[in-house]
Amino acid sequence: MLSTVYHSQRVQQLVSSMCPTVKSRCSVGRRATNQRWYAAPVHKFEKYDPSVIENDWYKWWQKQGLFSPKTGSAQDNGKKNASEFSMLLPPPNVTGVLHIGHALTLSIQDAIARWNRMNGRNVNWVPGMDHAGISLQSVVEKKLKRDTGQTKYDLGRKAFVDLVWEYKRDHGDRIKQQIIRVGASLNWDSEYYTMDPRHSRTVREAFIRLYEDGLIYRATKMVNWSCALQSVISDIEITPAHDANDYECAQRHGLPVVQVFGNDGKIVNMSDFAEFVGKSRWEARRLVIKQLMASCAYLGKRESEESVISICSRSGDVIEPMLMPQWYVRCDALGRRADNLVSTGDIDLVPTRQKAIWHSWLSGITDWCVSRQLWWGHPIPMYWIRWNSAINRPGSWVAAENKQQAREKALKGLSAIERDVLASMEQDMACTVTQDKDVLDTWFSSGLLPLTTFNESKEDGSGTLEPHASLSSITEKTALSTVLETGQDILFFWVVRMAMLCTYFAKIPPFSTVLLHPMVRDAQGRKMSKSLGNIIDPMDIIDGAKLSKLEDTLKRGNLPKEELRNSTKELRRLYPQGFQRFGADALRFALILYTQQTQQINLSLDNVKASYHFCNKVWNAFRFVHMHAEKLEMSSESRSAVQSGQYEAWLDGLDRAHLTVFDRVLLSRLSVMLKAYHRAMETHRFAVAAEVVRDFVQKDLCDRYIEVSKPALFDNIDIRTSQELWQRHARDGATDDMSVMQSEWQAAQCSTGLVVYDPFAEKETEASTALVFGVISGIRSLKQQHSARLAASTGGGSVFTVAVTLPNGADEQRQMLQAIVSHKECIRRMGKEPGVCIRALDKNEGLNKVSQAFVP
């Protein structure tokens, strides 16, 4: 039992990386030297209640500054040589709500961050929000129409942009609070917003430099146009001017390109289609069919063939291919460089099957349209210069930070004769300067985030950003950050763009490793959507939700009536009782376990419930340890070693003669588990790491060791939840580690970690006790299956005969029988049976050779 008091700390550390609040109970009394720890929100209740634990501990973590990386000589509690670990949280939309995919990302990344802290690394996990160009503008436009009946054109551009900023200030904090509820240990001191001044400057400077380097150009090409949004949309997902295939055919054969539709989707060509001008595209198509029928040229329609129609996910509008001028990034050279980063190993892509997908996509990459016809977003820093009539020079585009800089650049480009002509004029009269009205694609902004957040050459001595400071090359690091973890659905939208843009400027990759997790679907493997009624809100899992609340949420989704009716019916079928309150730790642990499903995650609440029971088991297990720890005696030397953090010295001085066989087996199992856990975390197999911790806690610690310890104790000798247990147990007289997330593993510097436990590995002892626990399990199983019959026939008592197959060797047979005999009292107590007969059967001679172990 003595070993549990100390070694439970190691288990607490393991659990804390995935269930950070399940682990924290702090002793009520404190010594005077530890007065600062009284502020910790230790809970005295016995029952596991995640709602109270999780809310209180996060506030304390933030107040103590535990999420911020250490700097200077005090770095990592005085460890000056601590290695750096940096990671960027994929920025959610500022006006969005936390969905289950976000929860999965946060769960995985938080486990990574906490594990690295506990391995002595200086962790900088940076959060931020995306300005969500199309999404936020659409939300504000709908609200404006609903509240006032006005459109953005009624307000004007400046007033509308001001309204968007106001909406962001009023509603933009919602998803941040939800992230906090999940328990993510983010460095909020470094929080960014993709429209803040610092990142906005990085975006402008990057665009200008790419343009000046010849990597950005303007051209008239076929684009995907949303008439509803009045903007080009991403090109990843009837005429030569409105169909990509027709356009390519026209280019090959020199055919004229005739525009039919305007930006609003109405017919605009007066010369060729006068009778259709002003008609919507839908009405015009119906009229075309009528004219064809009238001229007997209409042959009918074929119902058997399906056609693919692109739909805008934001507006539901049918996308129209349109020919219009836009700004493009040349991607051939940038793409080759990004492709080489993976092929040479400069970026490690996990899982490895994604490498082939990465190469396939980049080998056929086309130029990237980065302009959007929106009002909300980063304005494109391009200015059109129209010269005074005195200068015989056509208009041109200039890339500049502002209008004045654009004018100055344009004037510098004039010849000496042209400057002489303009000498008598005011500079402002020489030309008119007009900024491009478009904004940049949101992914262009997001693709530059590592430069803003991790490039350390940020300011000059006065605190002012130097020109191109965030875009300067870096020589002292091999990558801007350590790890990027995100969903595989944005591999090309975001990850590839970062690899292309950041490497171009910094000359090093934006990250060393990319971890891609699968998409979350419902238990039947269906995509989660409002129309199916199967969306699972993480907050409903954490806090619980009645069916009526789930139905109200569905009603607010603006679904058509028939679709709402069907979705409500499906919702009632799937979740007739609503959601039980499971807490954040249970959700996180369940999601991490799900990462073993590499293609897609079919989420079932049954598994979340199982994880809740696991968290409850951890809580009760350490309650049991703390209840009985005071009964144990520890020498002053051992206590001093433990309190000073000298665990190796304590272990070296441990007298094994005082350890029971079950103490030794627990230490051996702990040694095996810790190595497996660290190997799994180092190789990014998070589900495996979670499984080995769960199996150790449930099987080795709770079902076996604690159960074995109970008779001895009772006969007179015993990620917030984890933070709670840690505070009650490990803080008494501990060192300066302020929290379990900062309490380092007692390990030598090796890839597997925790070599200090190697001497405790005892395979033979494990094998012998495994046999004993197998017998006990067999007895319990028999009792459960036949309890009613046995009670009737024996009056509540019974004598079991349990057959055990012997190995071949005589020594092994003798050891097995000896193990059973020596632990007969344990078997009797744990089996809760007064009479048990163990018969060992020789597997070669069958029933002919039987050795009776004991008959109590």
Image (cartoon, helix red, strand yellow):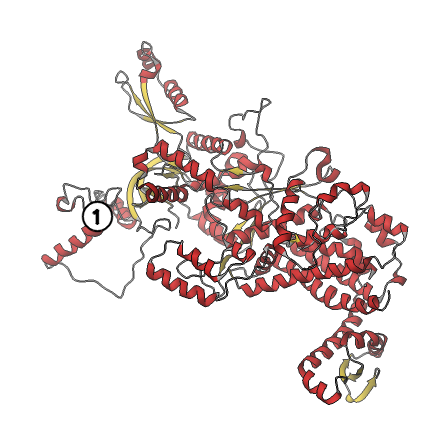
Query: Is 81 left or right of 635, judged from the image as shown?
Result: left
Residue 660 drawn at (x, y percent)? 85, 65
Query: Is 31 left or right of 213, judged from the image as shown?
Result: right
Q: Is residue 333 visible?
A: no
The one nearer the camera, 183 or 264, is 183
Quadrant of the drawing holding the N terminus: bottom right
Q: Is residue 290 visible?
A: yes
The one nearer the camera, 509 or 62, is 62
Residue located at (61% from left, 54% from top): 51
**Does residue 27 lie above or below 615 as drawn?**
above
Q: Amino acid at mark 1?
A: Ser
- The single residue placed furthest to the left in the displayed view is 295
Residue 624 drawn at (x, y percent)? 76, 61
Q: Secondary structure at mark 1?
A: loop
Q: Which residue is mark 1?
A: 280
The one nearer the camera, 676 or 45, is 45
> How many neighbours does mark 1 have within 10 angstroms: few (below 14), some (14-19), or many (20 or more)?
some
Residue located at (88% from left, 54% from top): 653
Residue 838 drawn at (x, y percent)? 80, 82
Residue 682 drawn at (x, y percent)? 65, 52
Query: Is 497 left or right of 349, judged from the image as shown?
Result: left
The one nearer the camera, 182 or 270, is 182
- The single residue placed furthest to the top in the displayed view is 424
